[in-house]
Amino acid sequence: MKKNMGMADRLVRVFLALIVVLLYFTEVIEGTLGIVLMILAGILVLTSLVSFCPLYLPFGLRTNKKE
């Protein structure tokens, strides 16, 4: 599994996940939408931690510098 995410991409994903978590715990988003967004936030954090996004593979995308 080669890394295909750059630092800016990773930071944006973590920032978006933090916003979703904040909105969920302040009850701005709730119910089914809140649960779905929390799952997506978890996926964003996970992919940023491993620097690999499986959705980039079919499209040949890379946001990091070539090795």
Image (spheres, rainbow, N blue to C red):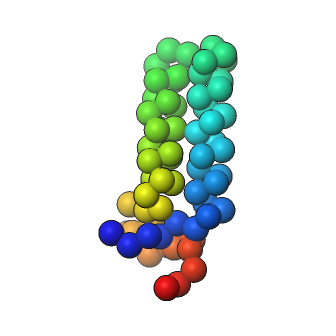
Q: Quadrant of residue 52?
A: bottom left
Question: In front here: 11 or 57?
Answer: 11
User: If the image is split into quadrants, where does the N terminus sit?
Assistant: bottom left
Query: Residue 29, how many percent across, how many down?
Result: 61, 20
Query: Residue 45, how many percent across, how many down?
Result: 50, 45
User: What residue do we see at 48% from left, 53% from top?
Assistant: 49
Question: In front here: 18 or 34?
Answer: 18
Query: Residue 67, how many percent across, how many down?
Result: 49, 85
User: What residue do we see at 51% from left, 31% from top?
Assistant: 37
Q: Is residue 52 above or below residue 47?
A: below
Q: Is residue 67 above or below residue 39?
A: below
Q: Position of 35 compared to 24: left or right?
A: left
Query: Residue 59, how many percent across, how many down?
Result: 44, 71
Q: Position of 36 compared to 11: left or right?
A: left
Q: How many numbered discs, if any?
A: 0
From this viewpoint, is residue 55 visible?
Answer: no
Residue ranking furthest to the bottom: 67
Q: Quadrant of residue 50?
A: bottom left
From this viewpoint, is residue 38 visible?
Answer: yes
User: What residue do we see at 50% from left, 46% from top?
Assistant: 44
Residue ranking furthest to the left: 1
